[in-house]
Amino acid sequence: MRGEGLRRVIELVRKELIQVFRDSRMRRLVVIAPLLQLVIFGYAVSTDVRDTRTFVVDLDRTPESRELIASLTSGGVFRVVGSSDRPRDLVTALDTGRALVGVEIARGFSVDLRGGEGATVQILVDGTNSNTAIVAMGYAERILGEFGVRIQGSTRPAGIDLRERSWFNPDLLSRNYNVPAVVGVITMLMCLLLTSLAVVREREMGTLEQLMVSPLRPIELVAGKTIPFAAIGFFDLILVTLVALLWFRIPFEGSVILLVLASALYLLAGLGLGLLVSTITRSQQQAFMMTFLIFMPMILLSGFMFPVTSMPATFRVLTLLNPVRHYIEIVRSIFLKGTGFGPLSIQMAALFVIGLGIIVFASTRFRKTVG
């Protein structure tokens, strides 16, 4: 019986794969959609601040003030879009959205700078986008500090040699931080969509009932419906990971085996959620809408877009039930830090418990629904 059961599962898996790749829309969904999403997310999702529109009011008009403006714009963070000798023009530029940053250099700037008493420069930032405002202010403060040190000489106390270095992601590129997480987001989306739509499509066509009256046992039916999409999920995972490494040049410092193990546990949760969606929907349209109803809160509570530590206490607790959160922490640590199994064992255990719980619950509901 075990041999017969295995043969039936293999035949059902083969039938599912043929059905998926026979449909041109499904082929595009499996291959093209993950690549397209990775490229869009990889280039669009960035917290780096570049070419920030800057309006300058230079009331000093000295070589020192012009050198300060050149220092601000030389790194590509700030781009001067206008200048004036009237402070109210700066306010107008900020009010109308023409500029996001305003710089006002007061009269006597060079005299105060050379005199050693310290010169004052006013920086005004449009705080509508708080992230851009905070990052721009940080860049401006650092550039102004370096300019003052260069002009006046070292202002640090004797005996202190301060040297800053980023231990991981030394170039501080947000793409290196975001793209590994995008791999997890895309993988979860594909597992949810493919599993839920495939099962519901069988129900719409009336073939699910035919499968139930066949010699297939419920557990064999569940296995036959999930194994093909586990294989497709791994294929998509490998595909987008290769693109992240070869196209975006994301550093990979960790273990491939550990990444595969974590991904297997993660796929278990994704397939279980897709199976669960198929038990509470009756059409592909309903399954599609339900998928995104589940998917969006999972992403928002994963730490992908907003740090988990900045969330209210109640939502921080909820994130512990979110497999996307644990997988993103794992994949970022493996890619950028080369972290081993030990420090990631808690996240791995959480993925195992969550994935196993979801797949058991979804399988039970699935058997009851189609039985």
Image: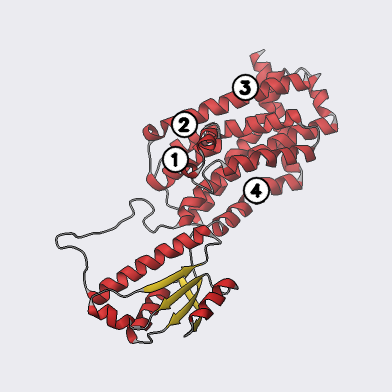
> Is disc 1 placed on a helix, strand or loop?
helix
* Quarter location, residue 13: top right
Residue displayed at 38% across by 74% down: 121
Q: Which residue position is annotated with label 2? A: 348
Splitting the image into 4 quarters, where does residue 2 fall?
Answer: top right
Give the distance between the C-alpha atoms of the residues marked 2 and 3, in whole angstroms: 18 Å
Per the image, the residue denoted by label 4 is 31
The label number, if any, that marks residue 360 in the structure image: 3
What whole-number distance in Å separates the C-alpha atoms at marks 2 and 1? 15 Å
Label 4 to label 1: alpha-carbon separation = 22 Å
Q: Amino acid at mark 3?
A: Val
Disc 1 crowd rating (10 Å Cα; few below 14, some 14-19, many 20+) is few
Q: Earlier in the sequence, mark 4 or mark 3?
A: 4
Q: CA distance from mark 4 to mark 3?
A: 29 Å
How busy is the neighbourhood of tag 4: few (under 14 within 10 Å), some, or many (20 plus)? some
Real-space Cα separation, disc 2 to disc 4, in angstroms = 28 Å
Judged by depth in the image, the label closer to the viewer, 2 or 1, is 2
Give SS at disc 3: helix
Question: Amino acid type of disc 2?
Answer: Met
Q: Describe residue 213's horizontal placement relative to residue 7 as left or right.
A: right
Query: Identity of the amino acid at label 1?
Result: Val
Do we see residue 7 in this rendering?
no
Residue at coordinates 75% horizontally, 32% vertically from top-left?
199
Mark nearer the N terminus (3 vs 1):
1
